[in-house]
Amino acid sequence: MATTSNKTGEAKLNSFRTGPDDKGFFGLFGGRFVAETLMPLILDLERAYDDAKNDPEFGKALAFLHTHYSGRPSPLYFAERMTADLGGAKVYFKRDELNHTGSHKINNCLGQILLARRMGKTRIIAETGAGQHGVAVATVCAKFDMPCEIYMGATDIERQAPNVARMKLLGASLNPVTSGAGTLKDAMNEALRDWVTNVKDTYYIIGTAAGPHPYPMLVRDFQSIIGREVREQIVAAEGRFPDALVACIGGGSNAIGLFHPFLDDKDVAIFGVEAGGHGLDVENGHAASMNGGTPGVLHGNRTYLLQNYDGQILEGHSISAGLDYPGVGPEHSWLKDTGRVTYVSATDKEALTALQYCTRMEGIIPALEPSHALAHVMRLAPTMAKDEIIVMNLCGRGDKDLFTVAKALGMKI
Amino acid sequence: MKTQTRIDRRFAALKKEGRAALVTFITAGDPDLETSRKILFGLPKAGADLIELGMPFSDPMADGPAIQASSLRALQAGQDMKKTLALVAEFRAQDPDTPIVLMGYYNPIYVFPGDRFLDEAVKSGVDGLIVVDVPPEADEELCLPAIERGLNFIRLATPTTDAKRLPAVLANTSGFVYYVSITGITGSAAPDVNNVHSQVARIRKSTNLPVAVGFGVRTPEQAREIAVGADGVVVGSALVTAIQQSLDGDGHATGKTAAAVLDLVNSLSKALRG
Ligand SMILES: Cc1ncc(COP(=O)(O)O)c(C=O)c1O
C-alpha cells in the first residue's frame, strides 16, 4: 500500500484506496486461504475479473442493467421529519432498498453474473443469510437462464420465510444447511463444499465483501456504485460532501460500497455499525466481530472473527439474519486497525426501535440490517450541528423481516 | 542432504519391503480423549504405517459429513490444541518410530499462535503438518517456519493442480505428496482407479517424493487397487464412521469403539500386505 514517511519516520498512509496488494492482502488482512482444489479457480477468477475491468463492453453491459433492470441511480433522500425530530445534523438516506429485489445485493449479483458468463460457467451457487443475496442471485439466474443452487441455514430459512418463497418462485433450488447453528457461516461452508466438488462448470457468487481474494475486491468494486452516486447526489443537493457516513456491517458489502469512494476524503467521518445482539458483554450473544472478536482465518481470508481461545469459531447472534456472521470483510478489519473507519455496534433492541422510528417518521420500513445503522444515526445526529450532514445507507427494505419484527414486538399478524 | 525425518525413514523402509504405506486418519479427541488415546496407541499394532491426527476445527470446509461429525464430537468432548499436542507427546513417549502428521485447518494454529504451535509440535514429537487452507502462495506464513524447525510440510495435489501449477505445489513439499483423488470433500464417492493411477504417474514425473492417495478410499479392496503405483493410501472417513457407528444412543463411546476402528485398520493393512 502507498505510504510516505513523516518526520518522525513513522509510515503514514497517503491513500486508503489502493488495496489489496497483489496477493490479496489489506495489510494483515485478506489473502487466499483456500484448499488446493480451489486455488486454480480463484486465480482464474482474478484474471477474468482483471480482464473484464479493462473491457469497456463489460462496463457498458453492467451500466445498462443498472439503469434498466435494477433501477439505478437509487435516490438520495432527505429525511426531513427525522432530521427535525433528532434536532441535529441533516439526515440523508441512500435508498438502495428501492433497487429491484429490495436491497443492495443486486449490485453485486449483476456484476458477478456477467463475469460468470464471460468465464463460460454454466451453473451458479451461492450462500445466503437474510435471503436478500439469495433472492438477488436467483433473480439474475432467472434473467440469464442459469441453473442455481442456494445454500441457506435452516434457522434462517425459518426466520426469512418470504425470501425463501421468492427464491423458489424464481426457480432456484434451495439447500437447507443444518450443521452448526444453521446460519450464514454454515451456509458458506456448504457452498464452499459444493464449489470444491463442482469445479469445472460452477461459479460461486459470494454475497458479501469477504471470502478469498479476489472476492472482497470485486464485491467492493461492484458495490462502490453506491458511494460514487452519493458523491454526485450530495453535491447536487448540498453543494458539498457529507460530514459523516453510516452503514451496517454484516460481511460489509453495503458499507464498503458506500465508504470506499470516500476513504481519501479526510473530512468525511465514517461509521460502520455491527450487530450488538443482546449486548457486547454477552458471550456469544452478538455478531460484532471487530468490536468483540480477534484476528483469525476463516472462509479464505484473515479477518476479525468471533472465536474462542482455541480458534474455534463462535456462532454469534443477531436478530438480523443478514448480520449474523462471525467474520467481516478483510478490508474493514484493515480500516479498523488503521483508524480510518470507526466501528460501533447497535443491539437487537436498538435496531427494533430504529425500525419503528423510521417507519413512523418517514413512511419507510427498513430491513433489520440498516436499522442497526439507523440506531447509530439516532445517537449521532443530535450531537452534530444543524448544518452538518449524515448520509446513511438504507440498503434494504423491511418486508422480509415483518414476521420477525411482529414476533419481537408481540404483534399478531 | 537434508536430515532424514521419521516420515522419510518410514517410506524408505516400506519401499524396501515393496509395499505401500497405510496412512490412517482419526481426529484427536474423537469421541473423547480417553477413547481416542486408546485408538491412537493401538494403530501401529493394527497395521497403520503413518498416522494423520486431525486437529478438530469448528468449520472444516473441505470435509464431508463423516469428518465434520468427528471434529464436532471431539470439540464437544473438550478437545483443544493443547490437548492434541499433549496426546502426541504421550504417544511419542511409547512409540519412537511411527510418524505422526497433524492435519487440519489454519485458524486454531494461527491463534495458538503459529510460532509457539510449531515449537510445541516439534517438542511433542510431531513429524509433519497438513494444513488444508494454507496454499503455496502463503508459504512464508507457516510452511517455511515449519521447515526451518525440521517438520515436513505435506502439500495436497488435486485433479485441478495442472502442469503449470504443480511445480509451485511441490516446491516446498517434503515427506510425501498427498494426492487428493477427487475434486470434492473427504468421504465422497470412490475415485476412478485408472484415473488415479495415471494422475499419480503424472505427479511422479515431477518429484521423487513418495505419493500417497486419499479421499474416498473406504474398503480393503479399494485400498489394494489404489495402492498399485502409489506409495501410500490414506483412509479417514471410513475410520471415523466406524467410531460413529460404535457409539451408544447418547453418542458416547462403548466397549466396542476402539476395536471397531482397529479391526478395520487391521483388514486394510492385510489388504496392503497381502
Ligand atoms: C438488507 C441487507 N443489508 C445488509 C446485509 C449485510 O450484508 P453486508 O454487510 O455485506 O452489506 C444484508 C445481508 O443479507 C442485507 O440483506
Image (cartoon, coloured by chain):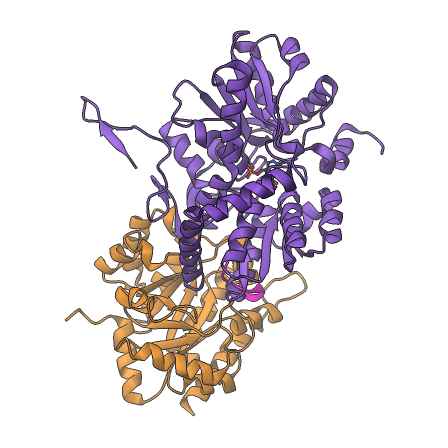
Q: Is residue A183 visible?
A: yes
Q: Quadrant of the C terminus of chain A?
A: top right
Q: Nearer the viewer, residue A181 or A49?
A: A49
Name which residue lies at 59% across and 56% down.
A125
Left/right placement of residue B142 relative to residue A103 reads: left
Name which residue lies at 33% across and 52% down.
B117
Residue A305 in the magenta stretch? The answer is no
Q: Is residue A52 above or below residue A35?
A: above
Q: Which chain is purple?
A: A
* Residue A158 x, y percent position in the rendering: 73, 46
* Residue A108 x, y percent position in the rendering: 55, 43
Residue B65 in the magenta stretch? The answer is yes
Q: Nearer the viewer, residue A324 or A85?
A: A85
Which span is picked out in magenta? B58-67
Name the tint of chain B in the rendering.
Answer: orange
Q: Nearer the viewer, residue A361 or A234?
A: A234
Outermost residue on the bottom side: it is B274
Q: Nearer the viewer, residue B249 or B53?
A: B53
* Residue A278 x, y percent position in the rendering: 62, 30
Name which residue lies at 64% across and 17% down.
A79
Tell me the chief SS of the magenta region.
Answer: loop
Q: Is residue A91 above or below residue A305?
A: above
